[in-house]
Image: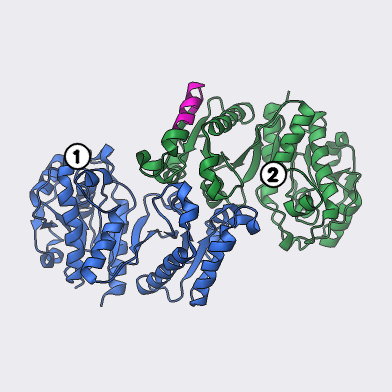
Chain colours: A blue, B green
Amino acid sequence: MAPPLALTLGDPAGIGPEIALKRWLARKDGDPAFFLLADPDATSRAARALGFDAPLARVAPEEAAGAFARALPVVPLGVAYEGAPGRPSRADAAATVESIRRAVALVREGRAGAIVTNPIAKKPLYEAGFPHPGHTEYLGALATELWGAPARPVMMLWSETLAVALATVHIPLAEVARSVTREGVVAVGRIVARDLVARFGIARPRIAVAGLNPHAGEGGTIGREDLETVAPAVADLRAEGIDARGPLPADTMFHAKARAGYDAALAMYHDQGLVALKTLAFDQGVNVTLGLPFVRTSPDHGTAFDIAGRGIADDSSLAAALRLAARLARATAP
Amino acid sequence: MAPPLALTLGDPAGIGPEIALKRWLARKDGDPAFFLLADPDATSRAARALGFDAPLARVAPEEAAGAFARALPVVPLGVAYEGAPGRPSRADAAATVESIRRAVALVREGRAGAIVTNPIAKKPLYEAGFPHPGHTEYLGALATELWGAPARPVMMLWSETLAVALATVHIPLAEVARSVTREGVVAVGRIVARDLVARFGIARPRIAVAGLNPHAGEGGTIGREDLETVAPAVADLRAEGIDARGPLPADTMFHAKARAGYDAALAMYHDQGLVALKTLAFDQGVNVTLGLPFVRTSPDHGTAFDIAGRGIADDSSLAAALRLAARLARATAP
């Protein structure tokens, strides 16, 4: 039996506990078993407050798969937290962070098959002294620490309709042009190609690389970067035997006919790729981190503090994240 | 009877003549009458070369509507050109430019209801000494010259699914952040609001303004421009009684549920808006220029020199451009 998936707590003041409970309540035969890394008592309180009839099982990871049919398996975190819905607090930060660390460690130990992360908020973590820029960077640091080799995490948004990886992520638009480098695009393209083979089982992935500028620079008349940075990066990737093409005008590369020609798009910046993905597959997108020595997926939404505790959160992106994590973990099981 | 639409020649080495002929051949009862501003002999030659059985009528604009049922009305340009398919030439530039000028003049004189422009290419025009940055800027200059008042053209891409106007257009991405100003966003938003009322007949248009940065800057942590430039511009627009909202995270503003909440989106730059539009409505998009004293639409594609003369060009965007021009001209007829 495949090891269960480890689902992190996320920010306990957000919708993470609610969607974890909802997902367990909506489980069907054949759904991948998962356990929540949380405090069992706090999770019970959250379930009662939401009016959910969801029995919990306090388990070790090895017992989660067996318990999953009758109760939501909770692996105790050993760190207390408040988790008042809609009221994020720096006092909850230690539990949020420990949940992520434990999940990665359990995968490293072979006791979990992959990790699925509930959303976190940066502000309470920063206030509590969290030294990493964000979730993904922390996972990269844990990978380096626990596997002993540097990791370069790459953010890819995946849906049945479109997969798009990003060369740059959460930086101001004013910094994008100078942050897109030939070496960076090559490094990201290489990781995308490798993980599409190793984790997604695509024998010869086709990668469509977006141009940085409108019309991919139109031969240099709208910026030189596509000629001088992106095109050479695509050539480098091709020289390594990777089926990359581009730079392509971003506006015409995401319609249905264009999408049929590639397995993943590589966008140069956040909105270029995510406008396409979320326009096509809002609520069905999964955030998957490539370039790590383990499988990590995440629902493609935030903590949603504004609706936390009201029972109205949508668990469909978490459902997709769990399904994808199980699929990728199977494909890469030793 | 409404005055006919004036369809410009565009670059005669591109697909303009072909899609004009195709559109006339595919005409149905109730389609808006249009005339082509071109050389009748050259147009005849183009039709024969394509194997199209399309009779032409050499007419004055006033005769076009009456002739439309039996022949493609051509208003003679009086400027010769070669128009060799796929071989753009500076020798064709004078005809391309004169066709645009005549179309605008005919609207000014009340002899045409609106102008629909076939695609042009900048290179042959620049080589022939054309002093304007592009099509739209030339139309702005003609508006100023013929109406005697300054015009600020605003590019909007329109489809049945989504309408999106742009605060900046064909500039390198590296210049976008500094080109987006409070005054500029206000000026564009004001024109969009005014023309949605005056031309589209929307009594109280709702305008969704995109943030410049990912997540609309996330409270200033991903760039300050959304706080310091875009938000004040939205406030200025609201103070004028315009129902503008934003800055909104661009990635989550274009899915179906979000689109239901506004009449037009205002994107800060080219790919932010056009990735959404062309992903949703490729081949159905119409380029409509707001802020002019006349109605101008255009198919949302280029000259397509690579397929010119082969009879395979798709006239669906031109069809949509003609339909929209007729609708807007009716709404704004004196």
Crowding at mark 2 (Cα within 10 Å: few <14, some 14-19, many 20+): many
Percent position of residue B299, x then y: 68, 47
Relative to A183, say whether A89 is above or below: above
Q: What residue type is labelled 1?
A: Pro
Res. B298 mark: 2
Magenta stretch encompasses residue B236: yes
Q: In which quarter of the image is residue A63?
A: bottom left
Crowding at mark 1 (Cα within 10 Å: few <14, some 14-19, many 20+): many
Frontmost residue, A157 versus B286: A157
Which segment is the magenta one? Answer: B231-243
Looking at the figure, which quarter contains the C terminus of chain A? bottom left
User: In the picture provided, is B90 more to the left or to the right than A148?
Assistant: right
The answer to whether the residue labelled 2 contacts the one labelled 1, judged by CB atoms less than 8 Å apart, is: no
Disc 1 target residue: A85
Give the residue displayed 88% in from the left and 44% down from the top.
B77
Give SS at disc 1: loop
User: In the picture provided, is A126 more to the left or to the right than B240?
Assistant: left
Relative to B173, say whether A185 is above or below: below
Give the residue displayed 79% in from the left and 57% down from the top.
B13
Magenta stretch, main secondary structure, is: helix
Chain hosting mark 1? A
Percent position of residue A120, x then y: 25, 49
